Image (tube, grey):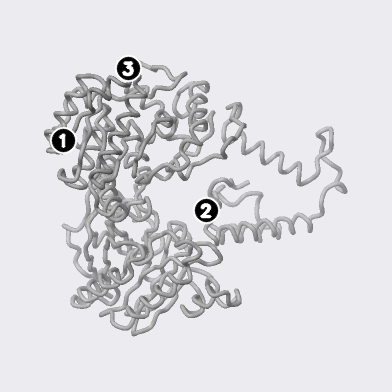
Amino acid sequence: MKLGIAQTNTRPGDLERSAARIRTYARMAAKDGADLLVLPSCALTGYELVREADQVGFLRDLVATLASLAADVACPCLVSVLVGVEGVGVQEPVLLKDGSVRLLGMSGSLADLLAKRDDAPRDELATKEGPPLFDIAGERVAVSTSPDDLDRLRGRDKGATVVVYLDDQGFCVDDPASALGAAVVEGGFVQDARDMSCWLCGVGGVGLYGERVFGGSSFVLSPAGTLVACGPAFEEGLVLCSLDERAPVDPSRGNVLFDQTFHLWQVLTLGLHDMVGKYGGGRPVVLGLDGTLSASLLALLATDALGPTRVHVLVSARRDEDARRSRELAGRLRLDVQELDDALVRAAQGDEALQEGIAQARIAAWARELDGLVLSSRDKTDLALGLRSQLPTAAFALPLGDVYRSDILDLARLRNTISPVLGKAQLTRADLPDLPGLTLLGPSVEETVFAIDAILLEHLEGRHGLRDVSAVTGRSPAYVSRVLEALDEAEPWRVGTPLVIATSSAPLADSRTSLGLAWRPDGSLGDQALRDDLARLSKEALMGAAGDGAPAPPEAGPSAADVAGQLSEVMTLLGDLANSGLLPRQNLEGLQEWLGARRAGKAGDRPAGGVMLWGPPFSEN
């Protein structure tokens, strides 16, 4: 079998143009003898549903587009589309072959799906059990549309000889596997291919979809875990590969090694390019150079992403030395530059907040004159702690809004190796978060910035509580508590935050707490101790503990049949949540097997090896 993978950068819902691109790639693949062309799952619909009032109309146009493609593509094509089923977005793999459109993950046809959207009976269309499967060119192909799907295929005999993994996550700086091909070079996915004894084909799109960036780097691994093909990173292209272990492997095939800072810069550059192009109509951008390293880095990023002729900067630094460096940077980058009028500076009468507000107003006015877009240099540390929350802004986007301040330093140093436009003084300066109660932890500002970011990282991306964050970072519970308190206090100010390029597994928009929440963690127990306490309390509640803490007599507790019934109801609820995508599910089949054996008295109190069967917020308890 010869497989083709098309790495495309499309705009969600631009069905006519995207279909034309698919036809072009199909002709190219067919010319080289491909039996199947695989498209990224974002190629037609993207990853976000249209609003509910438009879903029927959008689905009708999508069905027509798929039917048209099936009628004239030069070779069979596999593409996943996002459809709304009972209010939940579901990625549905679709095979276009011999003039027909075949749903692989659902029973029924596109006509049934369309009827379902028109309020037909709800039992006409259902998700099939197991992974989507189809046969082509003598191979049995299984389709995985998420990392969880891929995990469920490991170690289980599904009869497939080829597994196609359609990446739906995009790049996360804290997850090397999200770099696809670059992760394979480092050994990622290799064990997956070996465990499944299948060809493993990872397919990545290119560009910004929603707020998440996809970086290409599609790959093909043999059942032995050998890399036989790899697409370019951050570029469109066509990858062709014969699935034949006897075929010679080209030693030049491969991708760049995963480097966190390098990949982060590439993701930000591609993301800003697409954000302005897809969402902002390709307008020019205006930003301020206020003397901070974040502002200087944003000017560099905008220049790399958009070109110098589309970037305009206002020098608004308060210190003369910072203003001089800002002018020098703008000159080296050949940017259009203006300075904040002296009369406006004097009007602030030395009030720094007022001067910065005046600068933001001037930036907004200039953007209006140019019919341009305002970019803000606020970073993730700033947003998390609410450092500039009360200042006015007309920002269209915060490109660095999911980048910690400590990473800003690393990015600036990396970018300066490409062309040294930042002075040594700027590269050794980190901007200290100005927050009461947060003092210098050492002789350098940089050490304090790294400490604050480490606390935020362990809490948000690591999902650890106060005491565990304190233990991991080595900072006192009081210091950690102050940082997390600031994070919660800034929550209302983050509502309505402009566009952000999501680069982590926990952007602030996805890590919200309840507004106005009065409860605060006291740090008296670590995460595992809290879980143990919760398990004990749950057991007492279930079995009916006596008032004095002694075990209740047997007759006071529920019968074994009642407990089994409650467990069954809970499992049904969890299964429904997992199937709807609202709950991360790791191994439902393994959980069901263990429960069955447990009820028959043939299994212990916990699954073998203590394996986590469910993702957060559930433990094996």
User: Could you tell me which residue is drawn at 33 percent across and 80 percent down?
Assistant: 68
**Considering the numbered disc 2 on the image, is that residue within a helix, a strand or a loop?**
loop
Q: Is residue 8 above or below residue 115?
A: above
Residue 218's image quarter?
A: bottom left
Alpha carbon of mark 1 to alpha carbon of mark 3: how far? 37 Å
Q: Quadrant of the N terminus?
A: bottom left
| Residues packed near mark 1 inside 10 Å, few (<14), some (14 to 19) or many (20 plus) | few
Mark 1 lies on residue: 417
**Residue 116 circle label:** none
Q: Between residue 313 and residue 431, name the one nearer to us.
A: 313
In contact (CB < 8 Å): disc 2 and disc 1: no
For disc 3, the neighbor class at 10 Å (few under 14, some 14 to 19, many from 20) is few
Give residue 293's position: percent from left, percent from top.
26, 29
Q: Amino acid at mark 3?
A: Gly
User: Where residue 120 sits in the image (x, y, percent)?
Assistant: 58, 77
Left or right: where does residue 518 sit relative to residue 135?
right
Give the mark nearest the N terminus, 2 or 3: 3
Residue type at tag 1: Thr
- Secondary structure of the residue carrying tag 3 is loop
Query: Percent position (x, y) of residue 315?
Result: 22, 29
Q: Amino acid at mark 2?
A: Pro
- State the residue position of label 2: 584
Q: Which residue is mark 3?
A: 350
Q: Is residue 598 above or below residue 541?
A: below
What residue is drawn where x is 84% and y is 35%? 547
Q: Nearer the viewer, residue 184 or 534?
A: 534
Give residue 273's position: percent from left, percent from top.
25, 50
